[in-house]
Image (spheres, coloured by chain):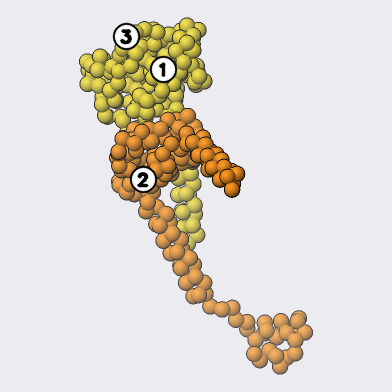
Chain colours: A orange, B yellow
């Protein structure tokens, strides 16, 4: 029995040791979670199609550290975003605010969609107004002769 | 109908043509027209400290450089030529560099700067919205950033933009 207790104690102790070893990777999971949420919405300036959280560029690492520090200093998400916008402009935001210079960005795709629908609608309407092709009785007779269909079928 | 389709096609083509002439790596800086962020940094190779406030009343240039930056090497002769004219003070911001490397780099290629200041951890760079070295800021007498060049300064830029702007700001 003592042996079992000793073994259990060892297992528990080793768990503690493992946990302590893992700590430096993410010293505060809450901070890291918030960092993830904020940095996912920010663009890496160096590799522009990557988010700050995904990028391993030197500047991205520095900026993430800045965000970390500001989270620890008790700044709100909006304050941290403002900090980035003040330095790098709306460009760092994956969702830029709706304003004069970004109207086209926000409205453009919908405007194009409407133009597309209008084009399809016009096209369909034109197609409909074209009268279905009809054959004169002479042409029909010729077609029947060529195709070898029986004459009584041509009355259709 | 045919005309409309051709029109739309030409419009898209024009958009593409304009888009191809733009540089997507150039992010318009929100700092132009705003006061240059304050800092207090040690000078490279000296114990003295420098703050942009020391330059009040002068039009001056702040050039962000690093010994590890390949483009800076292309830009360097242009800055050396510019410094020879002694038109306005040129201050270097040595960005995320090793002091030894920076000093060696300057002695090897020539030092166009009145002095450089050391931004070892890149913090001041972040305040200035630096994202690709080299970058250059033109700052007026009141300490307001008037122009920012992302990427190397070229002889054309000095002649066509920087010198005329300096003349205007000094008036």
**Residue occupying image coordinates x 45% and y 32%:** A61
> Is residue B46 rendered to the left or right of residue B101?
left
**Residue occupying image coordinates x 37% and y 28%:** B126
Chain under numbered label 1: B
Mark 2 and mark 1: Cα distance apart in space: 32 Å
Label 3 crowd (10 A; few <14 / some 14-19 / many >=20): few
- SS at circle 3: loop
Q: Residue B87 at x, y = what percent? A: 32, 11
Foreground disc of the pair 2, 1? 1
Q: Residue B52 at x, y = what percent? A: 28, 18
Q: Is residue A12 above or below residue B130?
A: below
The residue that disc 3 covers is: B48
Q: Determine which quarter of the picture holds residue B15.
A: top left
Q: Residue A118 at x, y = what percent? A: 43, 64
**Residue occupying image coordinates x 49% and y 54%:** B6
Q: Residue A45 carries which label?
A: none
Q: Which mark is residue B94?
A: 1
Are callouts 3 and 1 both on one chain?
yes
The residue that disc 2 covers is: A96
| Nearer the observer, A106 or B47 | B47
**Residue occupying image coordinates x 36% and y 15%:** B117
Answer whether residue B159 is visible to the viewer in this image.
no
- SS at circle 2: loop
Label 1 crowd (10 A; few <14 / some 14-19 / many >=20): many
Q: In this view, does A10 lie above or below B141?
A: below
């Amino acid at each position: 029995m003592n042996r079992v207790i000793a073994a259990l104690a060892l297992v528990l102790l080793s768990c503690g040791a493992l946990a302590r070893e893992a700590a430096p990777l993410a010293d505060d999971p809450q901070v890291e979670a918030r960092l993830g949420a904020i940095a996912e919405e920010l663009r890496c300036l160096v590799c522009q199609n990557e988010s700050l959280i995904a990028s391993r560029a030197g500047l991205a690492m520095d900026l993430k550290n800045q965000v970390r520090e500001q989270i620890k200093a008790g700044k709100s998400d909006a304050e941290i975003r403002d900090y980035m916008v003040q330095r790098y402009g709306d460009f760092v935001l994956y969702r830029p605010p709706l304003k004069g210079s970004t109207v086209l960005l926000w409205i453009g795709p919908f405007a194009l969609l409407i133009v597309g629908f209008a084009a399809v609608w016009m096209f369909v309407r034109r197609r409909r107004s074209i009268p279905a092709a009809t054959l004169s009785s002479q042409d029909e007779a010729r077609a029947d002769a060529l195709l070898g269909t029986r004459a009584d079928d041509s009355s259709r | 109908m045919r005309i409309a389709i051709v029109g739309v096609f030409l419009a898209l083509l024009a958009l593409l043509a304009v888009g191809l002439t733009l540089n997507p790596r150039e992010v318009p800086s929100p700092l132009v027209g705003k006061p240059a962020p304050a800092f207090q940094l040690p000078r490279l190779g000296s114990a003295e400290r420098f703050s942009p406030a020391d330059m009040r009343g002068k039009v001056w240039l702040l050039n962000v450089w690093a010994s590890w930056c390949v483009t800076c090497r292309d830009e360097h002769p242009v800055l050396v030529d510019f410094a020879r004219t002694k038109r306005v003070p040129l201050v270097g911001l040595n960005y995320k560099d090793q002091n030894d490397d920076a000093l060696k780099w300057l002695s090897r290629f020539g030092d166009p700067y009145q002095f450089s200041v050391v931004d070892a951890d890149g913090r001041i760079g972040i305040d200035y919205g630096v994202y690709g070295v080299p970058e250059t800021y033109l700052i007026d007498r009141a300490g307001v950033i008037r122009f920012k060049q992302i990427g190397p300064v070229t002889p054309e830029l000095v002649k066509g933009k920087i010198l005329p702007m300096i003349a205007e700001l000094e008036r």
